[in-house]
Amino acid sequence: MATEKRMGVCNLCEAICGLEITIEGREVVGVRGNPADPLSRGHVCPKGVAIGDVYADPDRLRRPVRRVGEGPDARWEEIGWDEAFDLVADRLAAVIHEHGDDALGVYLGNPNAHSLGSMTHGTAMFKSFRTRNRYSATSVDQLPHQLVAHLMFGHQLFLPIPDIDRTSWFLVIGANPMASNGSLMTVPDFPQRVRDLHARGGRMVVIDPRRTETAKVADEHHFVRPGTDAWVLLAMLHVLTAEAQPDGGPSVAAYADGLATVVDLVADFTPERAEAMSGLPAGEVRRLARELAAADAGVVYSRIGVSAGPWGTVCQWAVNCLNILTGNLDRVGGAMFTTPAIDAVGTGLIGRGHHDAWRSRVRDLPETAGELPVSALREEIETPGAGQVRAVLTVAGNPVLSTPDGARLDTALRGLDFMAAVDIYVNETTRHADVILPPTTALERDHYDLVFHLLAVRDTARFTPAVFEKEADQRHDWQIFREITLRTTARLERRAPLKKRLVQRARLTASPTFLIGQLLRRGSSGVTLKKLRARPQGIDLGPLRGGQLPARLPSRGKRVDLAPDLVVRDVARLAAVEAPADDGLLLIGRRHQRDCNSWMHNSERLTRGRPRHQLLMNPADLADRDIADGSRVRVTSRVGSVEVDVAASDDLMPGVVSLPHGYGHARDGVRMERSREVPGVSVNDLTDPELLDVSGNAALNGVPVAVTAC
């Protein structure tokens, strides 16, 4: 059979690397990075090389299945698409009719942001459900970043991006782009970009409780106690505002309000207090602040180690303030804003966001951007009363593994009246579904990145046609969303005005590719779908551009709010926190470049090699507890315990232990990753749903635990 090469894209993570894919018929026989791609420049990580494994995975579902029976005796039988759609619509409508709109809970996993069809049609489906019980992976991942962007700049996705290709001083806090390829900073080929930074005389500094892969290529690394980054960042602001400055003190652009409030807020957050809380010496805090201020182009970047902590919102606010007060916002080499061919912010494709428009029924937690914290999902299912969640629809998500106290959520899902899932796998979560509707995979559908071009370190545009035609008995995700929406709405007999109904049907019937063409025409870049089809490797729109503010500010007054009320109140709450005791252990997560959150652990290409499932622990902490390296240990938190192998590592700060995120494991004798025995446990059987940032984001890092020998 003849081989041919196709242009492809890896949408498994935020790096969106361009690929050259060699195929024989309907089989992938080779994958390499595309050197002509203007953003990824030939880079590809092991996940990208394994993208064909998802397409060919024998565990993958290709047609709808219905669960027959309960418990260990349950089995799955294939059914037709019309039968599956009608079953889902009938049961969802019945629950809503009997118990009200809020009886339906919906959950979106991370892969939704990586799917064009989900971005164009999934949002319409979820808006058609009038439930307030909306949840997503956002509140275990990035919610503080989005909330702070909304409060300070006027839009939840107007996020400053580090101009890594031109900066000279790069401070990384709680992020590991060597493993993640960047997050809320689309930065493929990060290793080469760091080498380029060093070649032009620049420096990278990392602050993290673990000596990560990124820390190992940095110019310097500093340990910090988990959950205390806020004191370090506020102390750096204290140095910038309290020390005598040659020009008389800090100043900000004329479009920024609230500098005096910032100065007052950080007045008592001295470097000495930061040392007492974090373990980072006061002298180092002062030096880092002064180096940032003195750099000709500097930028501070934080990610999930900070945002998934107890003070994520304060931390991200402080990061923005550091970049603003040093003059590094909206300037070359600093924190800049992209100018994508399709501006999801400027076009209104993604809403501005809001906060505390309603609250959860059980724990009175505020919503953000129309979603409640996913830490509340389990209690909303278990707690009787008006508004109790009785049916759940999940899309490309596995919250049993990826959200706090997954073991109890696993139990709660068993008690639902009905559950449906749009997913290609039977996993720890979807095994509770009555119906699973599997969409096509990345190689079988057209792709354009609406989100990650918005977050990239360089402005580019790329449209990637499907590598393989879908088979006749398959459905794209957008087709699944269309059918669920139209059929459920019809059963609910919600008679919207005729014009509105016709517009909804037309939008849901139009393909994502057609909609991309329309959105490109509305932009000012000159990029069209025709041009992108002619250049499938992508079109380079150039480096990020400075001097865009205040004109591009999405806030209605074109102002930056340096002191949002919510942040001011939380800094006051932070000020009352006492120094921690040093006798306990704190748990943090970690990720590996060969892992993709809670899935792809059944790809032998990715799971072979040295084991990486162990609990990492400092040798001194092992010795204090008389635990042998390589032995089996029990890790216990307030909500649960797991048994796992332990490995000694000097890369961990004393008093800190680390488990990787997302490993599947057996529950009730059922192993979800059936094609390969994957060791490890779910760290989220230990994380605590009671530990939340003010935004509602789960505090997955800094969880108190005890470790004992088994």
Image: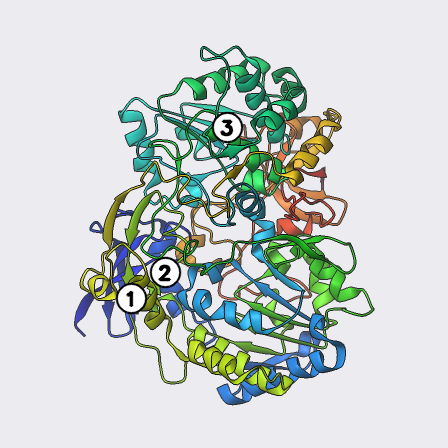
Q: Nearer the viewer, residue 87 or 496?
A: 496
Between disc 2 and disc 1, whose residue precedes? 1
Tell me residue 378's x, y (percent): 72, 61
Q: CA distance from mark 2 to mark 3?
A: 39 Å
Q: Neighbour class for label 2 at 10 Å: few (<14), some, many (≥20)?
A: many
Q: How is the image coloured?
A: rainbow
Residue 310 visible in the snapshot = no
Compared with 207, 526 (above or below) is: below
Amino acid beneath label 1: Val
Label 1: element kind: strand
In the picture of the structure, the residue carrying the numbered disc 1 is 28
Q: Neighbour class for label 1 at 10 Å: few (<14), some, many (≥20)?
A: many
State which quarter of the image contains the N terminus. bottom left
Which residue is located at x 69 percent, y 48 percent? 686
Q: Are marks 2 and 3 in contact (CB under 8 Å)?
A: no
Which residue is located at x 69 percent, y 84 percent? 94
Nearest-to-viewer mark from 2 and 3:
3
Q: Neighbour class for label 3 at 10 Å: few (<14), some, many (≥20)?
A: many
Residue 410 visible in the snapshot = yes
Compared with 38, 3 (above or below) is: below
Tell me residue 710's x, y (percent): 72, 43
Compared with 66, 359 (above or below) is: above
Q: Are marks 2 and 1 in contact (CB under 8 Å)?
A: yes
Image-based side of 146 in relation to 368, left or right: left
In the picture of the structure, the residue carrying the numbered disc 3 is 322
In the picture of the structure, the residue carrying the numbered disc 2 is 51
Q: Nearer the viewer, residue 541 or 679?
A: 541
Label 2: element kind: helix
